[in-house]
Image (tube, rainbow, N blue to C red):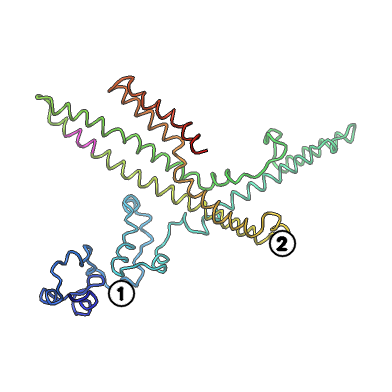
Amino acid sequence: MASISGLSKMSGKSYGAVKVTNAQNIEEAGIGDLGEHVPLLQPDAYSQDAASSNVFNKNAFRDFWSLLTFDWISPLLQLGNVKGQLDVSDLNSMPLPRDCETGEVYDVFSTYWEKEIKRSKESRTRKSVLAPGNQSKGDDGEKNIDKTNSVLDDLEIEFDDYAHPQYKPSLIRVLYKSFGADFLRAGILKFIHDANLFVGPQVLNRLIQFIRSNDADLSEGVTLTIIVTVSQVVMSLCLRHYFYKCYTCGLRIRTAIVIAIYRKSLVLSLKERHAHGGRGEIANLVGIDAQRMQDLMTYLHAVWYSFFQISLAVYFLWGQVGPSCLAGVIVIIVLIPTTKFVAA
């Protein structure tokens, strides 16, 4: 049997790595079934010139349908079909959404981080101004009180602004202010998905009753069919966009943390660097801790949606089988400490 490389030397149409001319050449090559050698997606509509050029459209991120169906990634799939294998340069030619660009991500993060640092400095200034040694009695005491009020007015600080004597910058608070909006929107999508998750069983129950009924109206069956179809489409879109937003949010958090650690390491002295664990600690922060923050974003919403799913499931099961549905809940409650004990 002739090899595929020998077949590819024949002149004619190109199917990925295989070139064929006509049925006679196929028979001569000893290949009787093209289904095992010809890809389903034919690259005839795209030339190699188009593959080497930038076929990506940055305006696709502004089109609602493209964003809804992820059609903006289609040029990358088409390019991979033409070339057979994507290179790093192909990925670089694909534009990123503006909120995912490295410069934009760190600009947003640094803006809120600088506000945290400023708030911490103002807190330290307030603490030093209100220290007992700076508040004397008599005429000098009145002057110091006036000075204190003047400093607080200049810093726009009120006495009840901070519950603690000194405010400490919080990385979690900065990350929430920087990227929390998309993370919360992902939670809304997950809520819609989980709510529609129980539409199917309820509609199926109604459909069974509709089929059993001899005098049921046809419009009722059509309505139930439309409802279950729409719910499945909404579920699919919401779940895909939920994971997309969670993954992009995690990537932005990881990018911001890595850049912040790198910039901080550039200004640390050798003594301070060794005091904080040296290059090994910095490498762990970048390679392990930042990655864990990214991985956490994908399933952090499980803190609430797991209880939401269980509550809805118990509610609907109670209407079908009554108190017997609590048996599964009891098993879950018993297994939680058991699993923790076994893992320990």
Disc 1 marks which amino acid?
Answer: Asp
Badge number at residue 270: 2
How would you rate the neighbour count of disc 1 (Cα within 10 Å): few for under 14, some for 14-19, many for 20 or more?
Answer: few
Q: Residue at x 21, y 67 (%)?
A: 37
Q: Under tag 1, what secondary structure?
A: helix
Number of numbered discs: 2
Disc 2 marks which amino acid?
Answer: Leu
Q: Position of residue 133 (x, y in %)?
A: 85, 38
Q: Is residue 44 magenta?
A: no
Q: Nearer the viewer, residue 69 or 297?
A: 297
Q: Residue at x 22, y 32 (%)?
A: 204
Earlier-in-chain disc, 1 versus 2? 1
Q: Position of residue 7 (x, y in %)?
A: 20, 76
In the image, residue 278 sits, relative to residue 240, either above or below, namely below
Q: Residue at x 35, y 47 (%)?
A: 240
Q: Residue at x 73, y 59 (%)?
A: 271
Q: Under tag 2, what secondary structure?
A: helix
How would you rate the neighbour count of disc 2 (Cα within 10 Å): few for under 14, some for 14-19, many for 20 or more?
Answer: few
Magenta residues (range) = 222-228
Q: Position of residue 27 (x, y in %)?
A: 11, 74
Point out the frontmost of discs 1 and 2.
2
Query: How far is the residue under mark 1 from the one under mark 2?
Result: 52 Å
Q: Position of residue 39 (x, y in %)?
A: 22, 65
Q: Is residue 224 magenta?
A: yes
Q: Which residue is mark 1?
A: 49
| Residue 210 figure quarter | top left
Q: Main secondary structure of the magenta part?
A: helix
Q: Nearer the viewer, residue 296 or 48?
A: 296
